[in-house]
Image (cartoon, rainbow, N blue to C red):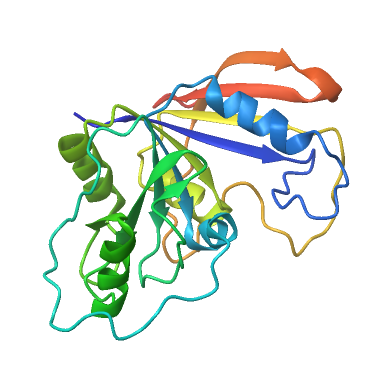
Amino acid sequence: MKPHIVALMMSSLDGRSLTDGWQLKFVFKLYEDTAAKFEADGWICGRVTMQEVSHGEDYPRGLAKAPVPRTHHFVERNASQYAISIDPQGRVAWKSNTALNSHVVEVVTEAVSDDYLAYLQSIGVSYVFGGKTEIDLKQVVQTLADELGVKKLIVEGGSRVSGAFVNEGLVDEVSVLIIPLVDGRSEHPSSFEIPMDKWRAPTYLSLTSIEKLEHDAIWLRYTKTDKVA
């Protein structure tokens, strides 16, 4: 059974999702407090975000003394929460197998290097294969459900990962924290980014709740619907 998937984003009034330059100290705590309310089994981010979380710059080479089998590798099957990194080529240099009190699960393709897999094994990071050269998100979430018993996941970004989950029809709920500011930087991404050659159709939503939070932020929650108003 597919996990319930929530796309949780934070954006300015004009839909920008990068927080650099906002100079608002409360935004990260507000986001984390909101995420905690879902009591999810795991949270998912893309490579760029996870590189910031990992605080690592590179991983050692030469650890693989032989080809590493392209089979899933699970170190922890009973974690209270999982940090799931969408990292097709294997570039995130984790320093340990834990991120923000969550067990790290790397999602890679079979094109990843043997050295990277050996490195993950050496520090106790779990990993799953999401495809030969590209990530099949439907396959990934089903693997997480079947192998780790994951029932609820939060997709936290970046915008391309969130866009990919929405585009694949995997998101059951879209949850957006609107921060009271106008960003205005046209080069900054929106909350959901889908390359035009991969875009399929709009995702239609139904509003389920609106809540005013502290610091004049607004929390909007939507569920996916097949109906077009």
- Of residues 218 and 152, the one drawn nearer to the viewer in this rendering: 152
Q: Position of residue 131 (x, y in %)?
A: 22, 63
- Say which quarter of the image contains residue 134: bottom left
Compared across the picture, whether 195 is left or right of 198 comes to right
Q: Position of residue 155 (x, y in %)?
A: 47, 41
- Say which quarter of the image contains residue 70: bottom left
Give the vertical position of 141 relative to 194 (above or below).
Answer: above
Q: Is residue 200 visible?
A: no
Compared across the picture, whether 169 is left or right of 133 comes to right
Quarter holding the N terminus is: top left
Give the vertical position of 25 relative to 40 (above or below).
Answer: below
Give the vertical position of 94 relative to 180 (above or below).
Answer: below
Q: Position of residue 102 (x, y in %)?
A: 43, 40
Count of all numbered marks drawn on residues in the image: 0
Q: Residue at x 23, y 48 (%)?
A: 75
Q: Is residue 11 visible?
A: yes
Q: Residue at x 53, y 58 (%)?
A: 54
Compared across the picture, whether 16 is left or right of 220 comes to right
- Say which quarter of the image contains residue 109: bottom left
Q: Residue at x 40, y 28 (%)?
A: 172
Q: Residue at x 39, y 80 (%)?
A: 60
Q: Position of residue 67 (x, y in %)?
A: 13, 80
